Amino acid sequence: MLTASVKTSRTKILGALCVIIAAIIAVILFFGAESSGNAAESISRRVADNKERIAYMASKGFETADEPSSVEEVLLPEEFDEILMEYNEIQKQGGFDLSPYLGKTVKKYVYPIEGEMETFVTLYIYENLIIAGDISSRTEGWQKAVDGGRNMG
């Protein structure tokens, strides 16, 4: 039988545990937030300014104008009506969900897509977090969700 002895102190053990716990937390925050379905936890959806909104849209494959064509504040109702419920179903297909933001005032940014006549990306933002988005065409009458995940459909 082979026996080994290691001399260590309580301080060294606590220090090593702290390093391991910090590493685990860092991994969870880095990888967990990206793959989370919860919009409030998604780091990739945080946008502080116009430059970051444009970068987000570019990451989804959209080349937009440098400035939004309109910006407005929108008060979401306390409860879903039929139209907003249908819109939220479209958003859920893209990985978003407006449910946690009912009753809140959000900012709506509309950006024309370069080279596409009357086609726009609309982002809804609450406290620098993209909570919904869609691509719509006024001339063709269609709308689909901006994919909040890593793929655009």
Image (cartoon, rainbow, N blue to C red):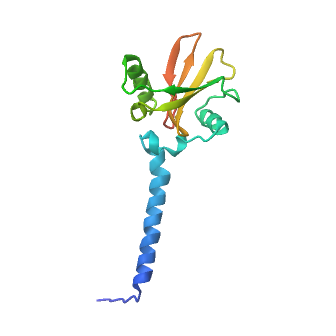
Residue at 37% x, 23% y is 80
Confirm whether residue 97 shows in the render. Answer: no
Q: Between residues 100 and 23, which one lies in front from this camera angle?
A: 100
Looking at the image, which residue sits at the far left?
A: 1
Count up the numbered dots.
0
Residue 47 sits in quarter: top right
Q: Quadrant of the N terminus?
A: bottom left
Task: Tell me: 114 left or right of 133.
Answer: right
- Residue 103 in percent (x, y) is at 42, 30
- Residue 48 in percent (x, y) is at 61, 41
Residue 24 sits in quarter: bottom left
Residue at 32% x, 89% y is 2
Residue at 52% x, 14% y is 142
- Residue 43 in percent (x, y) is at 52, 45
Q: Between residues 70 and 27, which one lies in front from this camera angle?
A: 70
Confirm whether residue 34 shows in the render. Answer: yes
Task: Tell me: 79 left or right of 112.
Answer: left
- Residue 28 in percent (x, y) is at 44, 55
Relative height, residue 42 to residue 21 (above, below): above
Task: Tell me: 72 left or right of 14.
Answer: right
